[in-house]
Amino acid sequence: MDVIDARLHLKRTGFELEAALALPGRGVSALFGASGCGKTTVLRALAGLERAAGHVRIGDAVWQDDAAQVFMPTHRRALGYVIQEAALFPHLDVRRNLDYGQRRVPPARRRVALAQAIELLGIGHLLARRPDTLSGGERQRVAIARALATSPDCLLMDEPLAALDAPRKAEVLPYLRRLHAELAMPVVYVSHAIDEVAQLADHLVLLDAGRVVAAGPLADMLARLDLPIASDDAAGVVLEGEVAERDENWHLVRLALAGGAGSLWTRDPGLAPGSTVRVRVLARDVSLAVTPQVGTSIANQLLASVEAIADDAHAGLALVRVRVGTLPLVARLTHRSAHRLGLVPGLPVWAQVKTVALLG
Amino acid sequence: MRIAGRALRRAAVPAMTAADWSAVRLTVELAALSTLLLLIFGTPLAWWLSRTRTRLKPLWLALVAMPLVLPPTVLGFYLLLLLGPQGPVGQMTDALGWGRLPFTFAGLVVASVIASLPFVVQPLLQAFEAIAPRTLEAAATLRAGPLDRFFSIAVPLARPGFVTAGVLGFAHTVGEFGVVLMIGGNIPDKTRVLSVALYDHVDAMEFAAAHRLAGGMVLFALGVLVALQFLNRRRTAAGAWT
């Protein structure tokens, strides 16, 4: 069910935003696009920090409706907002930063306890510290907890990881995944990094030059061959599976893919059997064979059938979408290989993926 | 050293006449009241100037800075006309039954507030402009309304600006001469402030008395600036915000 419904129009010199959004009320919706595509402007308009023409509705709450002359100022909107630079208040210690928002929410509307927000983000040991003594990752975790502590109806995040180096990013990402798993709150997540989106999002909105190019569930969007993201070097699908078997000796686990489509061996992520794991399978890491392979190091061979073939950005390359049961996989091959194998829609093939190439 | 110090004290203290002390008291009262009013009116003005997007902002900034560049006597002359019996403000105060402001302490306060305005507004403006818009936006997303944001975020972050504004406003009012003489004249116990008393002493060739007032003011000015440096130093040493 679509819970976040917005239509936004805004014109500036050299830029025009004309976006209609219908986002689900659960999970993470990513606004994805190159810089300058208007994704941050959309988020700011949702928050009321930017004045665009149109309407913004979150569930039953009408935050903006030009037709009815409604424009709620930002501080009346039940939202959480986290930006790249964290923007902690430098004159307050961590605890008082966290208190700042919660104190301003009427007690009857507090659903997230401060203790819960502190625990979720793992910042209990930082409460007495001042923001300028925190690392970038710690600052960002405090900023997220501060936003959560206001019990928002919707969490808006503008590239929360973009200012962090790779190790700090790896530090914060598990907390974001945890939020996703433990809170029912819808999240709108702006990013230009496809790997972040693939790891976190459930729903994807592609923006280009102020317009929505396409929108839909993440897995479907990543499997489409007609979108610009399909030609990205890091293009690929995401698959979800349950930890079904653990090979303690070799530190590997077998994931049973949804819908009984088969299984994939991957590195042991240290999760209990039965846990759900999301893996990314990049198109360049998938190869196709018309006969099952023997004498190969590749442990993952899935029986699939060819569904569609499209040109890639380079004239020598093709993108081939196959179905493993109901699940899509995309393989990036040369046109020559596709030709030699005689790939046509409907042809049964073996899709091979190296265990090493699966990304958590 | 002790003998010299005692001699200086003996020479200094008895020679301060009752009239001198009255001028000191009047000066401190004038400076304190003016500074208070300047902070009350200058703060919203500086806040507005720091946030406004009006195209007339350069004009407003120029108007605020005018007392810095105008000869104080020019300022005093026009204020005198404005507040006098023929001036619009003078006629209004007359009609309201408040009497006339020139040559009264109240008139001095009005004149000092205008003459010292840039010394208060400019440090506040700089302090407010140094606050990143995203910090105030973060407060808005945390449910703080405009007034709430101002008091809970802007004022504490601009604290060094308030210290500088208060100290400079006070010190400049103490040192003002031209405007004060034009508007206040030289009425003992009512409008004769330190700078005017000093002028009187010099005019009467009482150089020893003039030295005591002038020297005192030099020490005051030095003390104020050292104190300001000290406050700023301590603030940065505490690892605070900029």
Image (cartoon, coloured by chain):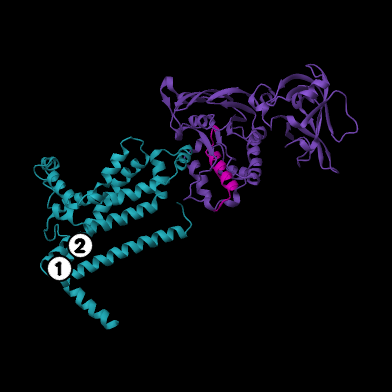
In the image, A242: left or right of A12? right
Tell me where residue B161 appears, x and y as whole percent: 37, 52
Q: Which residue is mark 2?
A: B25
Q: Which residue is mark 1?
A: B18
Q: Is residue B167 above or below residue B56?
A: below
Which chain letter goes with mark 2? B
Is there CB contact under 8 Å for labels 1 and 2?
A: no
Q: Residues within 10 Å of mark 1 (few under 14, many from 20)?
A: few
Q: Mark 1 and mark 2: span between their CA atoms? A: 10 Å
Q: Is residue A230 above or below residue A111?
A: above
Residue at the image point whose x is 13% and y is 41% from the top: B96
Name the outermost residue toward the right. A295
Colour of chain B in the rendered structure image: cyan
Residue at the image point whose x is 19% and y is 77% from the top: B11
Residue at the image point whose x is 76% and y is 18% from the top: A307
Which region is colored magenta? A133-154
